[in-house]
Amino acid sequence: QLRLVESGGGLVQPGGSLRLSCAATSFTLKLAHIGWFRQAPGKEREGISVISSGGSTTDYTDSVKGRFTVSRDNAKDTVYLQMSSLKPEDTATYYCAACGTPQFARCVLSDDNAFGSWGQGTQVTVSS
């Protein structure tokens, strides 16, 4: 089964930083547009960032703009989410997923049905 694996979560104080990583277990990420999502307890899953396969195009939801940066190293077949100025409301399980179409314009953060190969997620807790 094609699946992505997230890592890098943990407990961090407000204002701190974390870098999440996303890798694949049985396929290459190089050709895929990759999205980052998160889900807090009692809330719906939220799309927060997406990066094109070549890394030249990115998009962010408003709540993380200026604080989070998505990037990728195709030589290492890994996608990253650098999170800075973390807030308690960023506490959630974070997931990466592969967009199911080569058309980046269709990889819309508000439509998680466009994405697949979901991982198990990594927990991020922002608390003092």
Image (cartoon, rainbow, N blue to C red):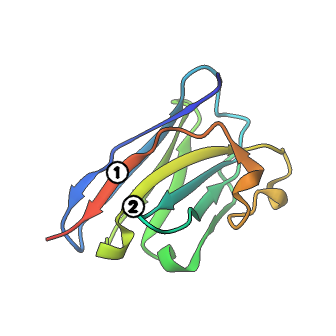
Q: Nearer the viewer, residue 53 or 126?
A: 126
What x and y, as percent, mark residue 51? 64, 54
Count all numbered tags in the image, as a single digit. Answer: 2
Tell me whether circle 1 and circle 2 mark residues in contact (CB < 8 Å): yes
Quarter of the view holding residue 18: bottom left
What x and y, as percent, mark residue 26? 60, 19
Identity of the amino acid at label 2?
A: Ala
Q: Nearer the viewer, residue 71 or 114?
A: 114
Q: Residue furthest left?
A: 128
Which residue is painted at 49% across and 69% down in the image?
43
Q: Marks 1/2: CA distance?
A: 6 Å
Residue 123's label in the rendered image is: 1
Q: What residue is shown with label 2?
A: 92
Which residue is painted at 59% across and 30% down in the image?
3
Q: Is residue 62 placed above or below 96 in the rendered structure? A: below
Which residue is painted at 39% across and 61% down in the image?
92
- Horizontally, residue 17 falls left or right of residue 30, namely left
| Residue 119 visible in image | yes
